[in-house]
Image (cartoon, helix red, strand yellow):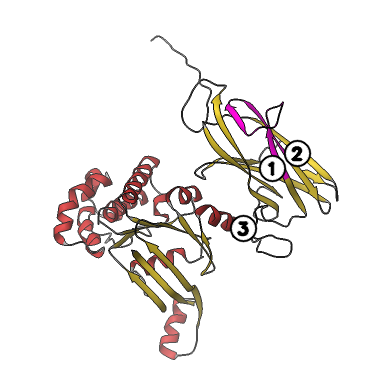
């Protein structure tokens, strides 16, 4: 069943240089504003039990789209069809009266979300308990911090029994423990068949929580696919490397970039033989074959290791390793690079993404970004047995008092 269907959605705003120009236009006539198209011809669907992410740069139209979906804004054109209750956590403070107490705002905000008086009273104690605000629940909300606003807003929205739960960047505030509590609640909501519409710059969370993603850029939908493919496309968008004669498309398995210098192959070995299987703590060597079409100087090599869920486990580049010198590549010559590191990772399968770029990151000048260049597995231990994602050597000291 489709909970949400959007067709041809458009939204524009009138931008004025000053409030005075707005007043002059009303009183005297004439055009004193410019139109800004926040969203143009957006189509999307969300089915029951599905989790959809919206990603894009600031100003891409993500928050505007969520406000249209939740009814905070009205579209200029297009159709929004909803089935069931859609609740969410948008900009902090949305739907609250800051002069009222948190307890009173439970009633105000919950009614805006479509809850009946009986539903509110039935769930009030659960909302208060989840928010963990203590005596502050009886204080005016103008005294609340951003983290406290997020706690109460999330508690009300998730307990409103939604068919679709909408989450904007608000979860990025507050303490880590409560964020983890919210994520556990979202996972439980998903496990019970709830649908999620998720906006975040935390791309690891996008991969973990969602099974489909849409990339927005300048108010347009530019990509739709799996979270991993969408994140890769988003990396290209923020690097401003759109498909040209010299910059490959994001679906190219050899990666994207200007490719004046290109990585042609990559492999791992343990100091003796090539292998894709290691034990935790074993020394690993990563070899990369590079060919330059023209002479390029002062490049940096970047590496990013992800686990099987797409989480970024470790990433760095030679610019961040301050003792490393930039790389130079003569025209027409093949070069081999080698990185060595202890494989201090937990049992599991991993991928390696590689990049050749200038400066501290790949955003301004990316020669070659090669996503998932190779795979490997950690299948045993050269260290004491441990659980989790990484091995940390510990020492114990006991002092008698």
Residue 82 highlighted magenta (yes or no): no
Q: 294 or 154, which is in the foreground?
A: 294
Image quadrant of residue 176?
top left
Residue that mark 1 sits on: 319
x and y percentages locating residue 372 in the rendered image = 61, 46
Q: Residues within 10 Å of mark 2 (few under 14, many from 20)?
A: few
Magenta span main SS: strand
Using the image as rendered, state which of residue 211 and residue 364 is in the foreground.
Answer: 211
In magenta, the rendered stretch is: 265-288
Location of residue 299 in the rendering, given as x and y in whole percent from the top left corner: 75, 47
Q: Nearer the viewer, mark 2 or mark 3?
A: 3
Q: Residue at x 59, y 41 (%)?
A: 351
> Image quarter for residue 27?
bottom left
Work out whether 4 lies above or below 31.
Answer: above
Locate residue 332 relative to residue 366 in the image: left or right.
right
First-in-chain label (2 vs 1): 1
Secondary structure under tag 2 reads strand
Q: Secondary structure at mark 3?
A: loop
Instruction: Give above or below for 33 relative to 196.
Output: below
Q: Marks 2/3: CA distance?
A: 26 Å
Left or right side of 55 for 83: left
| Residue that label 2 marks | 337
Q: Earlier in the sequence, mark 3 or mark 1?
A: 3
The image shows residue 357 at horizontal and vertical percentages of 70, 50
Residues 315 and 148: in front is 315
CA separation, marks 3 and 1? Answer: 28 Å
């Amino acid at each position: 069943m489709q909970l949400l269907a959007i067709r041809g959605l458009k939204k524009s705003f009138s931008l004025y240089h000053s409030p005075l120009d707005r007043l002059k236009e009303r009183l005297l006539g004439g055009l004193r504003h410019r139109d800004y198209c926040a969203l143009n011809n957006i189509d999307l669907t969300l089915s029951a039990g599905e989790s959809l992410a919206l990603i894009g740069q600031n100003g891409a139209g993500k928050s505007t789209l969520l406000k249209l979906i939740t009814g905070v804004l009205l579209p200029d054109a297009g159709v929004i069809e909803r089935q069931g209750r859609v609740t969410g956590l948008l900009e902090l403070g949305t739907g609250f009266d800051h002069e009222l107490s948190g307890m009173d705002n439970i009633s105000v905000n919950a009614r805006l979300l479509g809850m009946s008086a009986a539903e509110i009273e039935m769930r009030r104690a659960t909302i208060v308990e989840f928010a963990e605000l203590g005596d502050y629940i009886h204080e005016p909300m103008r005294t609340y911090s951003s983290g406290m606003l997020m706690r109460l807003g999330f508690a009300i929205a998730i307990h409103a029994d939604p068919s679709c739960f909408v989450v904007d960047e608000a979860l990025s505030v507050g303490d880590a423990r409560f964020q983890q509590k919210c994520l556990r609640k979202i996972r439980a909501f998903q496990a019970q068949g709830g649908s999620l519409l998720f906006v975040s710059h935390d791309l690891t969370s996008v991969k973990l929580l969602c099974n489909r993603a849409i990339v927005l850029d300048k108010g347009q939908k530019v990509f739709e696919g799996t979270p991993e493919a969408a994140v890769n496309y988003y990396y290209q968008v923020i690097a401003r490397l759109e498909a040209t004669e010299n910059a490959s498309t994001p679906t190219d398995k050899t990666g994207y970039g200007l490719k004046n210098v290109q990585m042609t192959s990559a492999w791992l070995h343990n100091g003796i033989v090539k292998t894709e299987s290691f034990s935790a703590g074993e020394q690993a060597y990563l070899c990369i074959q590079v060919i330059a079409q023209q002479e390029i100087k002062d490049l940096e090599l970047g590496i990013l290791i992800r686990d099987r869920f797409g989480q970024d486990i470790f990433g760095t580049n030679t610019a961040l390793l301050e003792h490393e010198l930039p790389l130079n590549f003569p025209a027409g010559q093949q070069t081999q690079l080698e990185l060595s590191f202890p494989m201090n990772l937990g049992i599991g399968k991993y991928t390696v993404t590689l990049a050749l770029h200038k400066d501290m990151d790949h955003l301004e000048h990316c020669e070659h970004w090669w996503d998932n260049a190779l795979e490997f597995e950690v299948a045993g231990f050269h260290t004491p047995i441990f659980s989790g994602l990484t091995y940390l050597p510990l020492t114990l000291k006991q002092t008698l008092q």
